[in-house]
């Protein structure tokens, strides 16, 4: 008698804590074939959570070409119901200048499947995977899980809190309307802003990395992050406002705008992001001058608002500076941590 054939599905992931939902299965990353469904899922999540980010297939492909400290074949989990993707999550690790190694994670879960325990089961699976990764890392290094989200992502934040995560940091998205005249603010003496050349990009990137060492949670700016940004339509050095002291970068605002995002939301917004001043040039009004130049730039381009994120506990007084320039908080982002233990 011939034994019946058995199809071994090695891609399937057993998830002990998964809820009893008919047709629900978990699997590993299938490679680029997953990208279109991932992009569709991100768009559904962003729409439900009122997120500004534009998401398309190109952005997913770009992200996964430049992953750092992550093996997607082992560090990702996908959830399907009757073969249709409803969620995926990923874990990776990053080192901070403070000496802490954070094991970061997220789960993108379709709005129609939230509140059923799927996100919690996937979170636990990623934690288990990250603990396995951490077991091969130096024992003396402080380690913590990290995740977070927008205040409107209530289901995910509740899941984190239920799993023992605590809020440790708060940030705002700040928006400045450009309807009123913008006061001129000259650069400090001896500094100049000049067009950014290709040869300037890497020195500017390194100067920003140095300047952000003082910021909470900051770590190495891996060259893969720059490589990913270079491929993005929002890599726009011609919009950057970079102050130079001779051959030294003193400070910057790396302006950008997202045409697809603006079209999707029916607005005209520019981002005054990556605002920083290196230590030797702080306390002279350089950040104010560069932001003011940026606001004038956006006005000349026909934008009606400018925006950027800020750490509300920034020790340099960034929040107060932005408020004095007319920026107002429009939403709050919360970072959560849990000791790896």
Image (cartoon, rainbow, N blue to C red):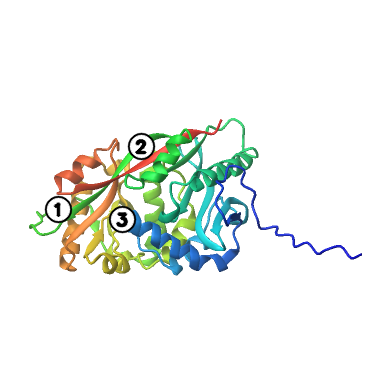
Sooner in the amino-acid sequence: mark 1 or mark 2: 2
Q: Please name the residue shown 52% across and 44% down the image.
A: 123
Nearer the observer: mark 3 or 1; the answer is: 3
Identify the residue position indicated by label 2 in the image. Answer: 169
Identify the residue position indicated by label 3 in the image. Answer: 50
Secondary structure beneath dot 3 equals loop
CB atoms of marks 3 and 1 within 8 Å: no
Distance between the Cα atoms at labels 3 and 1? 37 Å
Distance between the Cα atoms at labels 1 and 2? 34 Å
Nearer the observer: mark 3 or 2; the answer is: 3
As drawn, is 143 to the left or to the right of 139? left
Q: Quadrant of residue 264?
A: bottom left
Q: Is 284 situated above or below 225? A: above
Q: Outermost residue toward the right?
A: 1
As drawn, is 4 to the left or to the right of 48? right
Image quarter in which the C terminus is found: top right
| Front residue of 33 and 290 | 33
Rate crowding at label 3 as few (under 14), some (14 to 19) or many (20 or more) other CA atoms within 10 Å.
few
Secondary structure beneath dot 1 equals loop
Q: Please name the residue shown 10% across and 59% down the image.
A: 179
| Front residue of 5 and 135 | 5
Identify the residue position indicated by label 1 in the image. Answer: 186
Q: Please name the residue shown 54% across and 65% down the image.
A: 34
Residue 262 position within the rendered picture, expressed as x and y whole percent measured from the top left: 27, 66
| Front residue of 238 and 4 | 4
Residue 42 position within the rendered picture, expressed as x and y whole percent measured from the top left: 42, 60
Q: Is 113 situated above or below 123? A: below
């Amino acid at each position: 008698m011939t034994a019946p054939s058995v199809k071994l599905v090695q891609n399937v992931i057993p998830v002990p804590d998964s809820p009893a939902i008919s047709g629900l299965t978990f699997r590993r990353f299938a490679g680029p074939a997953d990208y279109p469904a991932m992009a569709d899922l991100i768009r559904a999540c962003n729409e439900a959570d009122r997120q500004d980010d534009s998401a398309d297939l190109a952005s997913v492909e770009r992200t996964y070409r430049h992953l750092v400290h992550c093996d997607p074949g082992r560090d990702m989990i996908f959830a399907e119901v009757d073969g249709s993707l409803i969620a995926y999550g990923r874990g990776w690790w990053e080192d901070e200048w403070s000496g802490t190694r954070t094991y970061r994670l997220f789960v993108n879960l379709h709005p129609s499947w939230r509140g059923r325990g799927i996100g919690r089961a996937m979170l636990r699976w990623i934690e288990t995977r990250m603990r396995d990764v951490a077991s091969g890392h130096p024992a003396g290094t402080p380690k913590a899980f990290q995740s977070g989200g927008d205040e409107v992502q209530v289901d995910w934040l509740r899941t984190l809190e239920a799993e023992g995560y605590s809020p440790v940091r708060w940030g705002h998205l700040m928006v400045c309307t450009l309807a009123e005249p913008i006061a001129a603010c000259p650069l400090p003496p001896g500094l100049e802003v000049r067009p950014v050349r290709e040869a300037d990009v890497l020195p500017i990137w390194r100067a920003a990395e140095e300047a952000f060492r003082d910021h909470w949670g900051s770590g190495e700016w891996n060259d893969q992050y720059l490589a990913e940004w270079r491929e993005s339509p929002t890599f726009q050095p011609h919009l950057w406002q970079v102050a130079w002291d001779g051959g030294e970068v003193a400070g910057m605002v790396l302006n950008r705008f997202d045409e697809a995002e603006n079209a999707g939301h029916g607005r005209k917004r520019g981002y005054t992001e990556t605002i920083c001043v290196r230590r030797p040039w702080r306390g002279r009004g350089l950040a104010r001058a560069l932001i003011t130049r940026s606001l004038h730039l956006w006005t000349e381009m026909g934008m009606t608002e400018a925006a950027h994120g800020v750490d509300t506990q920034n020790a340099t007084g960034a929040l107060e500076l932005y408020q004095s320039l007319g920026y107002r908080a429009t939403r709050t982002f919360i970072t959560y941590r849990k000791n790896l233990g």
